[in-house]
Image (spheres, rainbow, N blue to C red):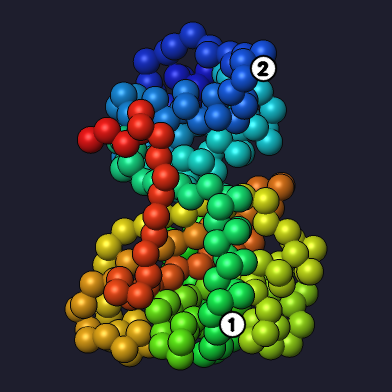
Amino acid sequence: MSSIASQNGKANQSDQKLDAALPVPLYHQAYTVMRSWIASGEFVHGDQFPTETALCEKLGVSRITIKRALSELAAEGLIARHRGRGTIVKAQKSKGIMRADFGEMMKNLHDVENTTDVELLSEEEAVPPSKVADDLDLEPDVPALQILRRRLVDGEPYVYSVSYIPTKVAERFPDRGAEKTSLLQLLTNAGFPPLEAYQRMNAASADEIVAANLGLEPGQPVLRAVRVFKTAELLPVQHTTMYFRPDRYEYTLVLPASEAND
């Protein structure tokens, strides 16, 4: 059987078997090893990444472990996974994107639902942007359910969100369900309860649509957060991009001192 090195034209390395006896989960060990390949330049932007089968052989773990590790890399923007074309390296090193703890995120979402009002703006089928399609493992030009909403506190909008739900998931939603129920609750009721979520956050400028929905002028700064929710089987079931008014929203992290040093 051919090695990863021969498949990708890279210098051959000995197999890096993982250790199930360690307290670190196998998927995270696999993620760390594969991330080091990209950080070291062994695989660079545009390279074809090894297949799942080759990775299973090299690292000595199951396919579900490799799938989860690859999902971690994809969430960091280091690789892009395309059905039929395999996995392509997108960057040479990590961009240092922060991830929110899923438990804390869920608690925050429940708190938000109890203290704010939601306004459903539209709910219709639409073709998601290519990056969203990649995150949802959808083929190009395949439509999904697009849900546009605003949340208000004391009658004033503070976040505008654009969500995409794969059609095979959304077809189990009740009509106009997003008007009264949180998307996470709809997913759970439909039989696709999210187990984990990845979050990317950065500063952005409000375009005309975002500005109009948040009561801002185009070009004013907003905080943009992208969240991708997955089931226990690592099936992507929701992609949401949120735009927050910085004067009405605050995001707080508590870090260990060892991670807080600049």
Q: Which mark is residue 228?
A: none
Task: Tell me: residue 132, above or below residue 53.
Answer: below
Image coordinates for residue 131, horizontal then vertical, percent: 43, 61
Q: Name the residue rendered at 39%, 55% in the picture.
A: 252
Residue 96 lies in quadrant? top left
Task: Tell me: residue 141, above or below residue 207.
Answer: above
Q: Is residue 188 visible?
A: yes
Foreground pick, 184 / 139:
184
Task: Tell me: residue 172, above or below residue 107.
Answer: below
Q: Quadrant of the C terminus?
A: top left
Residue 170 lies in quadrant? bottom right
Does the residue at mark 1 contact the one at mark 2 (Cβ under 8 Å)? no
Q: Is residue 139 visible?
A: no
Image coordinates for residue 110, horizontal then vertical, percent: 62, 66
Q: Which mark is residue 125?
A: 1
What is the three-letter code of the residue carrying label 2? Ala
Q: Give the crowd class for mark 2: few <14, some 14-19, many >=20 residues within 10 Å.
A: few
Q: Name the residue rendered at 23%, 72% in the picture.
A: 221
Left or right placement of residue 32 versus residue 262 in this view: right
Residue 189 lies in quadrant? bottom right
Left or right placement of residue 84 versus residue 220 in this view: right
Image coordinates for residue 41, horizontal then vertical, percent: 30, 27
Image coordinates for residue 89, horizontal then vertical, percent: 39, 40
Report the Cα–Cα distance between label 1 and label 2.
Answer: 44 Å
- Regarding mark 1 in the picture, which secondary structure is present there? strand
What is the three-letter code of the residue carrying label 1? Glu
Residue that label 2 marks: 20
Q: Give the crowd class for mark 1: few <14, some 14-19, many >=20 residues within 10 Å.
A: some
Q: Nearer the viewer, mark 1 or mark 2?
A: 2
Q: Name the residue rendered at 31%, 24% in the picture.
A: 40
- Regarding mark 2 in the picture, which secondary structure is present there? loop
Left or right placement of residue 130 versus residue 259 in this view: right
